[in-house]
Image (spheres, grey):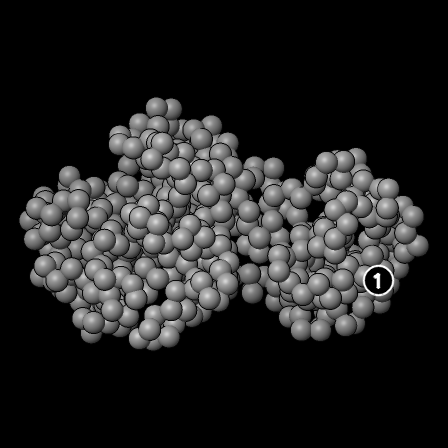
Amino acid sequence: MSLLVLLLLMVSVASAADDGAFIGVNIGTALSDMPSPTQVVALLKKQQIQHVRLYDADIAMLTAFANSGIRVTVSVPNEQLLGIGQSNATAANWVSRNVVAHVPAVNITAIAVGSEVLTALPNAAPVLVSALKFIHSALVAANLDRQVKVSTPHSSSIILDSFPPSQAFFNRSLDPVIVPMLKFLQSTGSYLMLNVYPYYDYMQSNGVIPLDYALFRPLPPNKEAVDANTLLHYTNVFDAVVDAAYFAMAYLNITNVPVTVLESGWPRKGDSNEPDATVDNANTYNSNLIRHVLNTTGTPKHPGIAVNTYIYELYDEDLRPGALSEKFWGLFDANGVPVYTLHLMGSGMVLANDTTNNTYCIAKDGVDEKMLQAALDWACGPGKVDCSELLQGQPCYDPDTVEAHATYAFNAYYHQMGMGAGTCDFNGVAAITTTDPSHGPCKFPGSGGKNGKFGNGTSLAPSANSTSDVSGFDPYYFSGKSLIQVIGMLLPSLFFL
């Protein structure tokens, strides 16, 4: 197979991946120093964010999205809902001004009609389904109904008795709205928009929900929540809420409407009665959420089925009223500076909000130590990593553990191979992160520190940039790898042959 064919194969696989699970962000505008629309789009591009949700259909913002390729969900604000739900002509005019006028330059893919209408604006509930249908009819008339889906976001509080998920059902007093709404979503090929906030579930549980369960932290099997009816094991609140929605729909004989989580996140600061609104918890939740979604883990009820999710939110909104935490859900401040660096182990560069765009390769937590040792031996041997920094008395000797030494060696190999696809795997015991693993005097390759060598040093192996042939790779190391992973490993060396 020629190098050109291999490259084309890699491109085709990358393209196919674009159609898989995704993470998007919500863009609120309640900032005293709101960035300009062009600054917003520039930040999104820099962070490789390809899906956004707007809370309106602001003309200046939509104009800035033109020709960006970013997929945009626009919204009908609650204050406009009554008018649109009572008049087909008003709905058609809204679609004409806010959608038709901007496509195809702006890649509008969905319209969120209202926001948590059933709980936040119950007086508009009787016209919600009419508003959905009127908006959809206008899209049909414009021949845009296949490109642009119509739905309405709901608070997860409309689901009652949500654990165990198999017993969940929608608030039956809302059936006159929910039943026709679900039938509309089913008939138009749309999806249920759900806002899922494990933070609030945790806060309101009075200690019943463990913090680790809300944050996606690993739980021992005896701590997992088990649905006694299905025997499905739940390791986090997010999955339990999403599955509760699926079971609630099934109770109404709706089984083919997918769930998209339109809002989810965790605040990094709160009032004195919100002690768990911390930077560390916000970082942990959002990092784990991103990895969970992008790994297409799915839920226990629907394993392997992506739950596409939009993080709340892009910016801190200092003008939001209410509790202090309402102002601190953002990933970035108004200057586009990340408020913390996400730990995106295994998620590559998607939404890597470390603006230095550095990534590192580290040993995974909890993996078999013998496998780690074998991978470490390979990296410092056939992998041609200079491991002299790990010798006793050298800057990276401490901590003297297999995991710490493997992390150094894995990262050195990853960087000397140009951070190519598949070069941070090591038979599944390594993962990518955006957090610099350097510590004390030990500076890792890629961190800009003085130590952390790529080349010979005291190693007997030649530099990876030499003209040695690629047979130095251990054949065992390629076992179980996909063709694309092997290509990613070999490609940097092939250019020097």
Q: Position of residue 202 (x, y in %)?
A: 34, 49
- Please tell me in which quadrant of the rendered image residue 236 appears: bottom left
Q: Is residue 17 left or right of residue 107?
A: right
Please identify the quarter of the rendering in which residue 175 is found: bottom left
**Residue 212, placed above or below residue 68:** below
Residue 168: x and y in percent read 24, 65
Side of 41 where 138 appears, left or right = left
Q: Is residue 406 visible?
A: no
Residue shown at 90%/56% (left/top)?
A: 461
In the picture, which quadrant includes the N terminus?
Answer: bottom right
- Residue at x 84%, y 62% (from the top left corner): 382
Q: Residue 19 appears at what percent x and percent y?
A: 45, 62
Q: Residue at x 83, y 57 (%)?
A: 380
Q: Is residue 478 above or below residue 135?
A: below
Most foreground residue, 53 or 318: 318
- The number of callouts visible is 1
Q: Secondary structure at mark 1?
A: loop
Which residue: 60% across, 45% down? 434
Q: Nearer the viewer, residue 18 or 191?
A: 191
- The image quadrant of residue 278 is top left
Return the residue at label 1.
Answer: 382
In the picture, measured across the screen, residue 234 lies left or right of residue 149, that is: right
Question: Which residue type does callout 1 highlight?
Answer: Pro
Evaluate whether residue 275 shows in this view.
Answer: yes
- Residue 465, position as x, y percentages in the image: 83, 52
* Quadrant placement of the C terminus: bottom right
Circle 1 Cα neighbour tier, 10 Å, few/some/many (<14 / 14–19 / ≥20)? some
